[in-house]
Amino acid sequence: LSAGDVKLNTGNLVIGTGGKGIDFSAQTVSALTGVTPDTSAGAEVLDHYEHGTWNPIIGGSGGTSGQGYNPQVGVYTKVGNLVTVSWYCSLTTKGTITTTLQLQGLPFQSNSTSSVHAAVALARVEAWTLDAGHILCLHINNNSTAGTFTQYEGTGSSNSATVLTTSNVNNDTSLMGTTTYRV
């Protein structure tokens, strides 16, 4: 078609070749101040959509073994290069967690852009040992399927972040949250 709309009365629009999708490159590039669009080949092609489940793990960067959960559930949606994950896990047995405390088992490996951090919304945090006045944060590591938990305190012009360890969780620690990260 050179003009007009495409309408499907029934059925699905199926892209028959991997790596192809809906191409938005004919759009006008944003002229907003401070906005730098990605103009590389394929940057304006919506080429992937998927959703499913994953198993969130409260673990350690140096080792994870012997954990028990009830519940341990996670869902994800991937659109293009963005993945949104939601999870709820409650430890019944802490097991062995060494080095830094992490959320492990993310469904896709994050990208390698070191200047981009994922934000997290936590709906439930129970039985964590945190310093008073601190906020629990999750930083998705580069090229990884894990994020590191930190506690963050920001007051006035000073702020500090402390990476959490096994001493910050217990046999009954629970966590529910959502985050979006780039792949």
Image: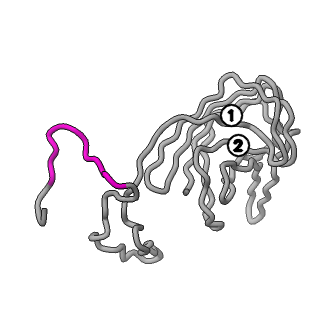
Residue at position x 25%, y 42% from top? 12
Q: Is residue 114 above or below residue 65?
A: below
Q: Is residue 3 left or right of residue 94?
A: left
* Residue for badge 1: 175
Report the quarter where the C terminus lies. bottom right
* Residue for badge 2: 103
Q: Of the two numbered discs 1 and 2 on the same chain, state the one appearing first in sequence.
A: 2
x and y percent of residue 110 in the render?
61, 55
x and y percent of residue 147 in the render?
69, 49
Q: Is residue 70 above or below residue 3?
A: above
The kind of residue on which mark 1 rests is Leu
Task: Identify the magenta region.
Answer: 6-17
Is the residue under label 2 in contact with that under label 1 (CB below 8 Å)?
yes
Residue at position x 57%, y 53% from top? 181
Q: Does the magenta run of residues contain 183? A: no
Q: Nearer the viewer, residue 50 or 93?
A: 50
Q: Quadrant of residue 3?
A: bottom left
Instruction: Tell me which colouring the rendered structure shows.
Output: one colour
- Mark 1 residue element: strand
Badge nearest the viewer, 1 or 2: 2
Residue at position x 74%, y 65% from top? 157
Q: How many residues crowd around disc 2 within 10 Å: few (fewer than 14), some, or many (20 or more)?
A: many
